[in-house]
Image (spheres, rainbow, N blue to C red):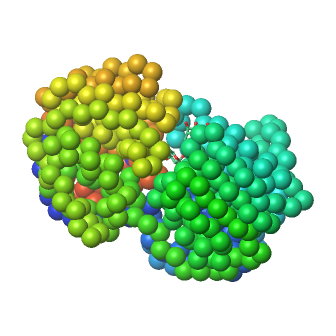
Amino acid sequence: MDKIIISGRKKLHGKVSISGAKNAALAILPAAALSDGVCRIENVPNISDITLMCKLLENIGVNVKMLNKSTIEIDPGNMRCEVASYEIMRNIRASCYLLGALLGKFNESKVYLPGGCDFGIRPIDQHLKGFKALGADYSLDAGMVQVRCDKLTGSNVYLDVVSVGATVNILLAAVKAEGLTVIENAAREPHIVDLANFLNCMGADIVGAGTDIIKIRGVKTLSGTNYSIIPDQIEAGTYLTIAAATAGDITIENITPKHLESITAKLKEIGVEIYEYGDSIRAKGNEDLKKCNVKTMPHPGFPTDMQPQITSLLSRAVGTSIVNEAVWDNRFRYIEELRRMGANISVDGRLAVIEGVKDLIGAPVKATDLRAGAALVIAGLSAKGKTIIEDIKHIERGYENMVEKLQSIGAEISKIRETDTQEEVG
Ligand code: UD1
């Protein structure tokens, strides 16, 4: 039960190097298990979700070797078609990618229904619809889903909702299916493109990733490859928002500016100066934040995974801002924590109405999920006084060395163990 303590109101200046993309890595590691050889994957973020994914793969016989802190070697030579540990699966949403990976490899998979951040109902009907179109039957029993077929055959799949997870899972199952699979209304997120690029490096035949129609012509074998994962769009967006919240001047490095367009557009509306370079962006914040309205959408819209962070920023903007969460049905739970810090936000279904306040005041708060935790860090960095954030395990699922990165640009922030906290708060 580690905690983060922040003394707010420091202007942050300097450079932050962005790590590899969590959601790309979480799809690419199980994809590597489809290979007939060994894959070496670079720029993997050092975060607990990746540790869990590696444990999950090891649990079914995949040999996972850390070559250094950001490079992982995956050898699926001894991979088994087995049920992976419930204890691991229930903690990570991307564990459902084992469904597609095992189905693609063994024509069969059986997994526990996945866990991960709790934003309300998280169905997998579109994943199953895709598997069925490829010729697999599925059944649900006692918290487990089982999918099997004699042979996977390419087919057309129209997704009723734009789903990242379903697009990933159908790609994993279809890559070695016989014939052509077409996914219509596919997700277009940068990590979908990264997954398709990785699979193509292994010998797959995928075109159209990044558009809403992806065509996959099945291949018989996939070879080992070396690959470097794209930078994390959401980590990058979080540090840009931190520059805005602290009236700081932060340059984020090792990024793809194109992936951040929907985020920088909103930050500009809020009054942040944005300077784009080849693989970096400089954000210069102002004391005066302007109100703005935000609606989350699938890519290239504003990402739902940046919604808590931008809401946290807008809690200090002059005037009334409205945030419409159009992807998840229950992603405002953290607002109660922001209110404890003085934010004036009301929630009505999927809408948050934010009346900007002049100051947030530090308080003890609790991270309810990964991005909610990031929102509280942003609030704490801009608040007067001391903020203590509990349940930081959520933050560590997706942000590599967040405390150290923030310290390096001048934040007064530290991580403490529960026993230290008792002394400190005591
Ligand atoms: C992924 C991300 C998550 C992000 C989300 C949306 C990973 C590991 N997680 O989650 O951080 O918030 O994309 O960008 O990459 N839906 C259905 N049926 C399905 C699948 C989804 O109705 O079978 C709905 C969901 O309830 C949700 C919407 O589709 O309303 C988007 O979900 P989806 O894109 O699948 O999210 P995840 O892949 O779970």
Quick one: 170 or 145, which is closer to the camera?
170
Can residue 424 be seen here? The reply is no
Q: Residue 344 placed where, x, y %?
A: 25, 22
Check the image and report above or below for 199 versus 420. below
Outermost residue toward the right?
150
Q: Please state the total of marks drawn on the protein image.
A: 0
Horizontal relation, residue 3 to residue 129: left or right = left
Q: Residue 156 placed where, x, y %?
A: 72, 52
Q: Quadrant of residue 4?
A: top left
The residue depicted at 29 percent of the width and 69 percent of the height is 279
In the picture, the quarter occupied by the C terminus is top left
The residue depicted at 22 percent of the width and 62 percent of the height is 276
Q: Residue 157 placed where, x, y %?
A: 70, 49
Q: Quadrant of residue 62?
A: bottom right
Can residue 171 be seen here? The reply is yes
Check the image and report above or below for 98 versus 246. below
The residue depicted at 9 percent of the width and 41 percent of the height is 287
Check the image and report above or below for 340 versus 426. above
The residue depicted at 47 percent of the width and 44 percent of the height is 298
Quarter of the rendered image showing ligand 1: top right
Quick one: 360 or 366, which is closer to the camera?
360
Q: Residue 26 placed where, x, y %?
A: 55, 59
Quick one: 414 or 337, which is closer to the camera?
337
In the picture, the quarter occupied by the N terminus is top left
